[in-house]
Image (cartoon, rainbow, N blue to C red):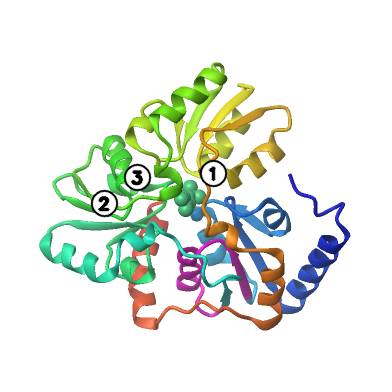
Amino acid sequence: MNNTTDNPPKKNLVKEILAWKKKREAVILAHVYQPGEIQDIADFTGDSLFLSQQAAKTKAKVIVFCGVLFMAETAFILSPEKIVLLPEIKAGCPLADTAPAEKVKNKIKELPEAVVISYVNSSATVKSLSDYCCTSANAVQIAQAIPSERDILFIPDKNLANFTAKRSKQKIIPWQGYCPAHNILTKEDIIKVKKLHPKALLLVHPECRPEVCNLADYIGSTRGIIEFTSNNTAKEYIIGTELGIFHPLKKNNPDKDFFPASENMVCRDMKLITLEKILCSLQNLEPRIIVPEEIRKKSLQALNRMIEIT
Ligand code: 13P
């Protein structure tokens, strides 16, 4: 799992990070797709919704966001008085990149009557063009809050849009983006892994393809998946989301067995963050994430509408 405790150089590195964290009055937030050793040093780990709630309420002066760019931007939008650090500036989100702001603007012009919901996995500018934000944990709830006669333009994940349309029974027009780490999982992969572990329950993230979701015993956010395994008596689970989630799953449930639906479900961007980069970031207070004020104010409205509903 992680070798921080029996690896002296790593142990020293962690000590230094914690000392600098104290000096900077910082808080470390880590998404559950982060490498295990980073999740272990974080003050809070969790899904996008939980982390954005923590970013909004923390009293720390500095937020070190161990995740990807849209998450750090969200933290800054919610807490502009704080210094928000993303230890590796190249940690982006290929899903968010499928919805460039100019294309989104044009689509909104084509559909002037539609309510725009953007998944948090989108740029700050796309959030600023949206009526509501959502995460995978609350997409259905947000869609249900829209009057049923209105069309909803859902940006950028087509698979989450499909899942949300099915559950909320709302009229959803999906943007055609997808997350490569989730969309890679096929029905054939599931059939293969189910044959190997016939008793295991299948839990998948709603960013997976519809034909994969149709085979699942549970579909939910990373937090939903973690809670499901802790509250369920089943001993075996096949997990259809990014492999970083195995760290909290195994830690919370040492008596249960977890099998990846596919070994290919890896988000390369999440893995760009390292302990060394976190230390460097705390020492230099760089790379700093700042969203221009006009965009921040507009995207804050969409985020606040989401937070109010949930
Ligand atoms: P969660 O909100 O479920 O943690 O998902 C975040 C994400 O980026 C999925 O690809």
Residue in the picture at 51% in, 63% down: 68
Residue 217 visible in the snapshot: no
Cα separation between marks 3 and 1 = 16 Å
Indicate the quadrant containing the N terminus: top left, top right, bottom left or bottom right: top right
Residue under pointer 2: 176
Cα separation between marks 2 and 3 = 11 Å
Left or right? Give the position of 40 relative to 165: right
Q: Earlier in the sequence, mark 3 or mark 1?
A: 3
Residue 92 point in image, percent of width and height: 47, 65
Per the image, label 1 sits on a secondary structure element best described as helix
Residue 198 colored magenta? no
Residue under pointer 1: 223
Q: Earlier in the sequence, mark 2 or mark 3?
A: 3
In the image, is residue 264 above or below residue 268?
above
Q: Is mark 3 within 8 Å of ligand 1?
A: no
Task: Sort mark 3 into few (<14), some (14-19) or many (20+) by Cα contacts within 10 Å.
Answer: many
Per the image, label 3 sits on a secondary structure element best described as helix
Residue under pointer 3: 160
Q: Is mark 2 within 8 Å of ligand 1?
A: no
Residue 204 point in image, percent of width and height: 46, 35
Residue range (magenta): 62-82
Q: Amino acid at mark 2?
A: Gln
Q: Amino acid at mark 1?
A: Arg
Per the rendering, the mark at residue 17 is none
In the image, is residue 228 above or below residue 19?
above
